[in-house]
Amino acid sequence: MKQSFLMVVLSFCIFSQYTFSQETVENPEKYTAHNKGKFFVYWGGNRDSFSKSDIRFQGENYDFTLQNVSAHDKPKGWHIDYLNPSRVTIPQTNFRMGYFITDHYNISLGYEHMKYVMYNDRRVNYTGYYPNPGTYNENPTADELTLDEDFLLFEHTDGLNYINVDVARMDDISSIFGIKNTDTFQVNITEGIGGGVLYPKTNATLLGKPRHDDFHISGYGLSAKAGLNLTFFKYFFVQLELKGGYINMNDIRTTNTSADKASQDFWFLQRMIAFGGIFRL
């Protein structure tokens, strides 16, 4: 009786071990099943749109505000400069690295190199005063002038640098498309919020003054984003992203004289495509 009982227990243990082993081999846990503890990094490019803004210029003998000024970005298109370390600040670029604190939530640090170029040769309303009106081909009236290049060139082209921290959520939606082996291909959606500082190198020529040509912390930004992440073979991904937000730049250097400055605030919309990797150390 005792021997029979031991044989039954031994047989059960062997069967259980065999069954467990079979399940482990047939259904191993996928690398993509959990994100906690993973790092990620990506590099890409962007296109940008900006709302109109009022820009105030202040300094010795002048204080005026240009109203509802329009601006555009300065795209380079698909270009080898995105891969050339000595020329990466020429195109509009994005770099981000982050860490998953849970399976769904990550925190990341990003550098977003946008470009902002004021449209010239347009009539705009203005208020305030400046020296020698009418001598810069701006053809002023009581409340309107032309943004001639002799009067003002105003660009954040090296660039409108938004250095920010994001907190984001990511969710796997592969099952919606019938994808079972997410270690081969995975579809995720992501959304998040963030904030940071603006660190531009503003290119401005104002009233014939020499321009200031150095990086300067000029303000802050707040943003929200949503995107689609396509992950291939566990470690590589392409991310498409829309990001919008508010930028307030209250201390823009315009000339070599520290008393000269500009200020503006506006909304932005950024479209991004990036290529990256996700891994555990």
Image (cartoon, rainbow, N blue to C red):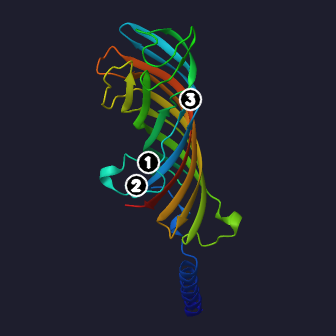
Determine the residue positioned at 64% across, 72% down: 180
Q: Mark 3 and mark 2 in contact (Cβ < 8 Å)?
A: no
Q: Which of pointers 1 and 3 lies earlier in the amino acid sequence?
A: 3
User: In this picture, is 215 found above or below 180?
Assistant: above
The first of marks 2 and 3 along the sequence is: 3
Q: In the image, residue 118 lies at what x, y percent? A: 49, 30
Residue 278 appears in which quarter of the rendering? bottom left
Q: CA distance from mark 2 to mark 3?
A: 27 Å
Left-right relation of 21 to 219: right
Q: Nearer the viewer, mark 2 or mark 3?
A: 3
**Which mark, residue 82?**
2
**Front residue of 58 and 279:** 58
Q: Which residue is mark 3?
A: 70
- Residue type marked 2: Tyr
Dot in front, 1 or 3: 3
Name the image quarter holding the N terminus.
bottom right
Give SS at disc 2: helix
Give the residue displayed 59% in from the left and 31% down from the top: 51
Q: Is residue 25 above or below residue 74?
A: below
Q: Callout 2: few (<14), some (14-19), or many (20+) C-alpha neighbours within 10 Å? A: many
User: Label 1, on which residue?
Assistant: 93
> Could you tell me how far apart the alpha carbons at marks 1 and 3 are, in whole angstroms?
22 Å
Q: Where is residue 263? Give x, y as percent.
A: 46, 20
Work out which quarter of the rendered image holds the C terminus and state it.
Answer: bottom left
Image position, residue 192 (x, y; %): 56, 43
Closer to us: 213 or 145: 145
* In contact (CB < 8 Å): disc 1 and disc 2: yes
